[in-house]
Amino acid sequence: MEEKTWVRMVTAQTPTNIAVIKYWGKRDETLILPVNDSISVTLDPAHLCTTTTVAVSPSFDQDRMWLNGKEFSLSGGRYQNCLREIRARACDVQDEEKGIKIAKKDWEKLNVHVASYNNFPTAAGLASSAAGFACLVFALAKLMNAKEDNSELSAIARQGSGSACRSLFGGFVKWNMGKAEDGSDSLAVQLVDEKHWDELVIIIAVVSSRQKETSSTTGMRDSVETSLLLEHRAKEVVPKRTKQMEEAIKNRDFGSFAQLACADSNQFHAVCLDTCPPIFYMNDTSHRIISCVEKWNRSEESPQVAYTFDAGPNAVLIAHNRKAATQLLQKLLFCFPPNSDADLDSYVIGDKSILKDAGIEDMKDVEALSPPPEIKNAERSKGEVSYFICTKPGRGPVLLADESQALLHPETGLPK
Amino acid sequence: MAEKTWVRMVTAQTPTNIAVIKYWGKRDETLILPVNDSISVTLDPAHLCTITTVAVSPSFDQDRMWLNGKEISLSGGRYQNCLREIRARACEVEDKEKGIKIAKNDWEKLHVHVASYNNFPTAAGLASSAAGFACLVFALAKLMKAKEDNCELSAIARQGSGSACRSLFGGFVKWIMGKAEDGSDSLAVQLVDEKHWDELVIIIAVVSSRQKETSSTTGMRDSVETSLLLQHRAKEVVPKRIKQMEEAIKNRDFGSFAQLTCADSNQFHAVCLDTCPPIFYMNDTSHRIISCVEKWNCSEGTPQVAYTFDAGPNAVLIAHNRKAATQLIQKLLFCFPPSSDADLNSYVIGDKSILKDAGIEDIMDVEALPPPPEIKGCPEMQRRCELFHLYETW
């Protein structure tokens, strides 16, 4: 009698993260081991996340993957690393209800289907590969009943994409660079959870850019090979900053947090500029945003907003509290109003309650905004920002039990 | 009988200069002593220069100065430094023809009038203070018959504006940082004269900018105080680069020259970015120019053009030779055409023979330029009207 085929499926959701002490430069390209520690804040997955369904079935004749509905190859080294490492840790699985029994040694003969979806555009430069690899690893670990904790899983996600390791936790996370040659101690740990400093509000300005960005992988390799400032940064500057940042986060010391986050973002971009050929991730709009924030911070007794930029022109602005976020949004909408034909509802997305607090309900309110007093001759640069996302620090990966959220069909294991 | 009054006058012309190994950061603000050596190329004064007339007369009742026709105060520390230092070195002057006799100790009682004129706009960010202070010091030295040579004069010009010391020579010049506390050994020396490497052609792209730039003085002070990368640059990177650059210039090794020049410009701007608050001198247009040059250099195998940027968005492009300069001007005019109402004659100024060699006589020739092959298919390298004008010089 032919065995009825079965499909075992798991769906997970992971957040993305933004580094406040930056990772830029590897000491090992294959294992993805960094030249310094890094610290990040995890963003609320309600606004930015990756959802991944992984399925296993004896009826699958090869590993396959779909990303945002389009099939991609899993043959690349990074995917192979993750698959191999999780498979090596797979354990017995028994699901009596569905009549599924998988022995530890069966896993190497079984193939998986993976479907992944980002609720934010890849083109927006919002670190989709961090969330993506973290989700892949987390979901596979649950599928294969691996016993490893999130720190151990982060060491595997790291081999898919370095910054992915930091998406295995919520709140503030540190990626310990590690010392071991095999990278077994290069992993993420949670510093504090998302509730520790929950008054922080994060506003992301997605900056219009026609440029094709230099990929992080290529860029940081060029930096390691050609920047004469990078090693000094990695050996002398970052170790001290990492300690200071951990203190600032622990003590909810926003002044120090902001000074460190801004300084480290700028130094990362300085190293990019010190590379051959030079890498320019920030553009004039990015600079204008920085100028706007710097002027406001200086006009207040203590900094109200921290800024940080990754490998692209988008600004991630972290406001001290809701009041600061509301004022920030008003200043940003004054300086960077939408094009006249834009719809406010798609210009400020995510948590729209900040917009409400700012008293802005429609385009007329945007037009009526007053210039920030601290900026002389403030200009309104229409259309330079594509849109804003309002969010906050968020939680780590979770499983989604609701089958309706699965991206693969429970019977065919193919994308829905 | 009242003595008939007299006026003794001297007029001098000095060039400006562009650093290829940058000066950024002082170890002494009053004496203007730098944290590292720097090397510059002097630009042809035919295109960019300062002309200064200095005059002395017993009828002058105070020191006065006019800059580009407008009277300005000489009371600032930097002007006072220069005046004091030259006056201390003034010697006897005798002009029998005019019946002028000035004894050494007369000088401290005499006042001077200074009129200075730049043949390029101050707003263009083309280092007018370097040329200006160099000219003032040089002219005063001649007026007061100081015996000092140009090196010693450079140590005085340095106290007006650091980079001014390098405008006391042509060709390639090095400002030695010195060790002495009193700055007596912090001065400029000529590495080679302007004939040594005369095939080089320099094209300056004056970039449209609405921004008011952070002043160099403020900027470099903020960098010294807040950049954690600056000391490493000054102590570890620049000393090696200075040696390599001197070799490259001596040997006319353009490949090394270009690599060092571009790297040092970028590192200077990196330190500016690493400052609190961060300083952005280059803008998107500057970046596009760099991208244009980097792509061409990469496609040729050996660099054809070096770029360097000072404390502003203007690009100083140094081409290997006339042929490279001709190709460069074609690529630049393709990527950065003038706006339709512009006049080619005021869009490319200075030495217009390069334009001729490039076969460009009017705006229609500019419009007809083909895209550089190395940037085909690059959506961001579109034609944009972003430059103010181009200077060609050497």
Image (tube, coloured by chain):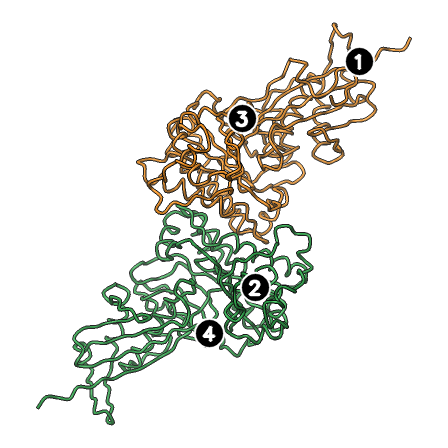
Chain colours: A orange, B green
Residue located farthest toward the left when viewing the structure as drawn: B1
C-alpha distance separating marks 3 and 4: 61 Å
Q: Secondary structure at mark 1?
A: loop
Which corner quadrant of the image does residue A113 belong to?
top right
Which comes before the other along the chain, label 2 or label 4?
4
Which residue is under mark 4? B47
| Identity, as a three-letter code, of the amino acid under mark 2 | Ala
Q: Are marks 4 and 1 in contact (CB under 8 Å)?
A: no
Asked which quadrant contains residue A57, the reply is: top right
Report whether A112 appears left or right of B28: right
Q: Residues within 10 Å of mark 3 (few under 14, many from 20)?
A: many
**Residue on which disc 3 sits:** A189
Disc 1/disc 3 C-alpha distance (Å): 36 Å
- x 65%, y 40%: residue: A29
Q: Quadrant of residue B159?
A: bottom left
Q: Which residue is mark 1?
A: A6
Which label was assigned to residue B306? 2
Return the x and y of residue A384 as percentages of the image width and height.
51, 43
Q: Nearer the viewer, residue A90 or B315?
A: B315
Q: Residues within 10 Å of mark 2 (few under 14, many from 20)?
A: many
Which of the two residues, B359 or A288, is positioned nearer the viewer here?
Answer: B359
On the same chain, marks 3 and 2? The answer is no
Identify residue type, mark 3.
Answer: Val
Mark 1 crowdedness (10 Å alpha carbons): few <14, some 14-19, many ≥20: some
